[in-house]
Amino acid sequence: MTAPDARRPGARLALERVGHRYGATRVVEDVDLDIAPGEFVSLLGPSGCGKSTLLRILAGLLRQSEGMVRIDGEDVAGLPPADRGVGIVFQNYALFPHMTVAANVAYGLQARGRGDRSSIREAVGRMLETVRMSAYAGRYPRELSGGQQQRVALARTLAVNPRILLLDEPLGALDKNLRLDMQIEIRRLQRELDITTIMVTHDQEEALSMSDRVAVLNAGRLEQFDAPAAIYDRPATPFVATFVGTANLLPARLARAGDGYAAQAEAGGALALPQASPCSRPGPVLVAVRPEQWELADAQADAGATLAATVQLVMPLGPSLVADLALAGGASVKLSLPRAGAPALSHGMPVRLRLRPGAAPAVFIA
Ligand SMILES: Nc1ncnc2c1ncn2[C@@H]1O[C@H](COP(=O)(O)OP(=O)(O)O)[C@@H](O)[C@H]1O
Ligand SMILES: [Mg+2]
């Protein structure tokens, strides 16, 4: 019998060439991930890209069609969920409605025969304190708000002391302000307990703000696995550039120019690039320019290093001025400037765009 309070450090988790098919339909392909003990990783991607399937494979609720899952180096094929040391929390809290908060949290400990009655009561008390729900121990789920129910669901999962915490869109049902509080709360708990955590989300802000690393998935494939800042600043693919944040994908021809590069835009005009990455091969490319990487040049600026555009729509958005512009040929481009000191823009106004000093947009093979 394991004492309910024996804290174990988070486990290392590895997926090796994991693939999955439902019948003949392949929904996960060739996914490799190596997750360090205590790391917080998000699986981020659009609806239907295979995030929940991967999580269910990790939990042992689903057997992958291909590849291997290792926990602390060991192949866990055939190991049932209860023997993997994983805890899972879903979006719909799945609390037992006829049980109090305390009974819900005690449930897993009792079911696993972890400790006698008084040690279970103590563990439940400690867990409720950890999720700041001590005052609600005697309430029933229907007497709690969504956020409170999700705290109880977390406490119930964490009470059995898993070494890996799996979260499937855990905050999807909460409104925006409550989400932010819960994001901070989950991250605090995760750090405090030092538990390896994989969270599924389709919300890029949530993934970027909470994670040590983010795995971006598209149609069952891993597009990039990197720290949040790297995902945003150095997207590996056009999909990542446009799914995480906003990017204008400009078709252009890349050529060397002095120490850097010049991109001759298909729409006319050109951009001077200090570097070209991940692709620097001369030829047809897509340049992924973030709205905040633009600046306005004056009308006399060198046409060889600017793009001509016409203002379509101007939107003041808090600290930023966001504008939708049309390039020659009609392609639309988004621009974001700090509102303080921004020039007055109006519909129909001709402008010239260039890259802000130091801006290094990603360049992809077209
Ligand atoms: N049990 C199932 N049987 C058949 N197809 C499924 C099943 N579960 C999910 N799918 C399909 O697999 C794909 C990936 O689903 P899922 O992993 O739930 O995606 P996500 O969590 O990223 O939204 C989707 O196209 C979905 O319709
Ligand atoms: Mg899902």
Image (tube, rainbow, N blue to C red):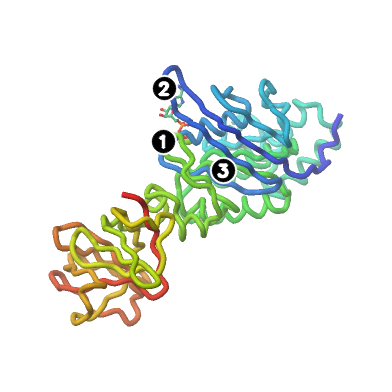
Q: Is residue 152 above or below residue 114?
A: below
Residue type highlighted by circle 1: Ala
Residue drawn at the location 54% of the way across and 51% of the way down: 226
User: x%, y% of residue 30?
Assistant: 51, 32
Quadrant of the image containing the N terminus: top right
Alpha carbon distance from label 1 to label 2 = 12 Å
Relative placement, left or right, of 51 versus 300 is: right
Q: Would you say residue 143 is visible in this rendering?
A: yes
User: x%, y% of residue 127?
Assistant: 74, 44
Q: Which residue is mark 2?
A: 25
Q: Quadrant of residue 317?
A: bottom left
Alpha carbon distance from label 2 to label 3 = 24 Å
The circle drawn on residue 219 is 1
Discs 2/3, front: 2
Q: Which residue is mark 3?
A: 199
**Foreground residue among 117 and 195:** 195
- What is the secondary structure assignment of the residue under circle 3? strand
Q: Residues within 10 Å of mark 2 (few under 14, many from 20)?
A: few
Identify the mark nearer the N-term, 1 or 3: 3
- What is the secondary structure assignment of the residue under circle 1? loop
- What is the secondary structure assignment of the residue under circle 2? strand
Q: Quadrant of residue 309?
A: bottom left
Residue drawn at the location 41% of the way across and 35% of the way down: 219
